[in-house]
Image (cartoon, coloured by chain):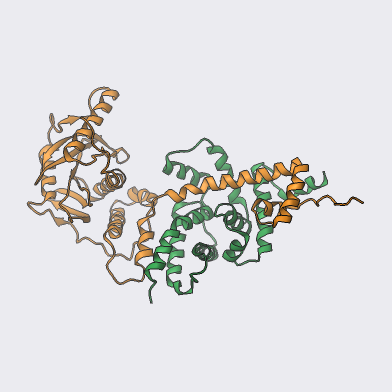
Amino acid sequence: MQAPDLFRQQLLAAVPRLRRYARSLTFDAGTADDLVQTALERALSHWHQFDQRRDMLVWLLSIAHNAFLDQRRRDSRMRFVDPAQADAQQDLQRADPGADVGLRIDLMRALACLPLDQREPLLLVSVEQFSYAECAEALGIPIGTVMSRVSRGRVALRALLEGQPRPEAVRTLRRVI
Amino acid sequence: MTPTPPPDRPDDARLSAWLDGELDADGRAQVDAWLRDHPEDAAQARLWAADRDALRARFDPVLDEPMPAALRQTVLQAGRPAAAPRAAWRQVAVAAGLLVAGAVAGGWLGAQVAGSPDGHPLASLSLPWADAERVRPGGWTHRAAVAHAVYAPEVRHPVEVNVAQGTATEQRAQEEHLSRWLGKRLDMPVPLFDLRAQGFELVGGRLLPDASGPSAQLMYQNSGGQRVTVYLRKPEPGAAAAFRFQRDGDLGLFYWVEDGFGCALVGKLPRAQLLALAEAVYKQAEDQIQPAPQGHKPAS
């Protein structure tokens, strides 16, 4: 049985945010939309599993998360797009590089350096503005784990942006002071 | 012993949860109190907040990007037996055309396919056009082909308004005049498509008679002196047609019809090269003609 119209309309409304999340995971617009395409196809073929009382986006980003992991497992040789290059590409598309191109390139590089298990919770909480509970649901991990991974991601990102290669050492030092 | 012990130093996870609004009222008050007395930790939290805002600012623009037709198509049509909507299969037609052209032109066009935001695997799709249908005499594409055949060989008067003469300032003024004049006469925006990425400079344009009103012809020329023309007209209601290719003798012609305009690209060039040009025109027309029936009433 095929997905009903209401479901399709809800799905369509969620596509922009799904694309944003995919872009923040993969950096490259084409790769991101491939991931979006996969997630949408899975959502459509499992529409009956969606509980209408729940948040469509949490469900959808959970599917995208799993699709992304599958893709990485399947293709362990997955090429990583240079974030600086992807950034430049996006700037071209927007034709408005903004005032802080240098800063954003650094931000993308730093983000790309984060381990995925920190990057995903950090993005879901920061960019998607998910609660820890929603983030836990989307990623299939306990709330306490979300909390610690988000904070470790923040510390690591800051350390990378400040040019400090070992985030753990930084925090330890501060603790001594 | 103090009556109320000072709050413990919040660890990273707690400070982070505070920033995310994940603490209950008591927890929040404790962290608030700690940060009041410890400016270095408050500064840390501000930096985290700044990073969060920077991440949002970096990815929020994705929300405003136009949705690729292939994704919309997937959501609305996947699993349905009904025919695909016109807009989506026109998109497919363009992409499939690129594949064919890519096979013809090899690596030359490969970069453009890779650069297309809507590029996706299409190998299993059959082409929506029967190969190289003939231009139908009496149809508007025939008029486009004839207009090309008449004016493209002209040496002295290929166009009515020439934008390739004079200083850069004069050229810009002529371009503006041409676009406004044709726009006013056709009663629709007539963008001067930029085909420089494909090696073609705008020569100028002219007004032409179509079946029941005016049409516009824009002429482009490359460094080898080869010319292509773009023919723009208002379509009959309900005449929308997908991206197609026609031949008339040694002339090739890509055309498509939207709700607001019909457009043909004509030239005596290899099909792959014509397609690259037509695709550039198609993209620019989507951006510049479709959304703008409003506000185009210039006083020429």
Residue B12: x, y in percent?
A: 72, 52
Q: In this view, does B297 lie above or below B24?
A: above
Q: Can residue A31 be seen in this view?
A: no
Left-right relation of B215 to B14: left
Q: Considering the image in quadrants, where does the C terminus of chain B appear?
A: top left
**What colour is chain A?**
green
Q: Position of residue B296 (x, y in %)?
A: 25, 38
* Residue most extreme to the front: B3
> Where does the image place residue B267, in percent across and percent down from the top left?
18, 44
Image side of residue B25 versus residue A77, left or right? right
User: Among all residues in the image, which is located at the extreme bottom?
Assistant: A1
Q: Which residue is drawn at 21% across and 35% down?
A: B225
Q: Which residue lies furthest to the left in this view?
A: B138
Report the residue at 52% width, 66% height from top: A59
In the image shown, does B111 or B9 lie closer to the viewer? B9
- Nearer to me, B212 or A19: B212
Q: Quadrant of residue B46?
A: top right
The orange one among the chains is B
Residue A104 lies, in percent from the top left, at 55, 42
Compared to A119, does B172 lie above or below? above
Q: Which residue lies furthest to the top in this view?
A: B167
Q: Relative to the observer, which residue lies in front, B287 or A9?
A: A9
Number of callouts in the render? 0
Q: Is residue B19 found left or right of B113 in the rendered image?
A: right
**Residue B219 vertical placement versus B27 (above, below):** above
Q: Quadrant of residue A147?
A: bottom right
Above or below, A29 against A105 in this view is below
Asked if residue B40 can be seen in this view, the reply is yes
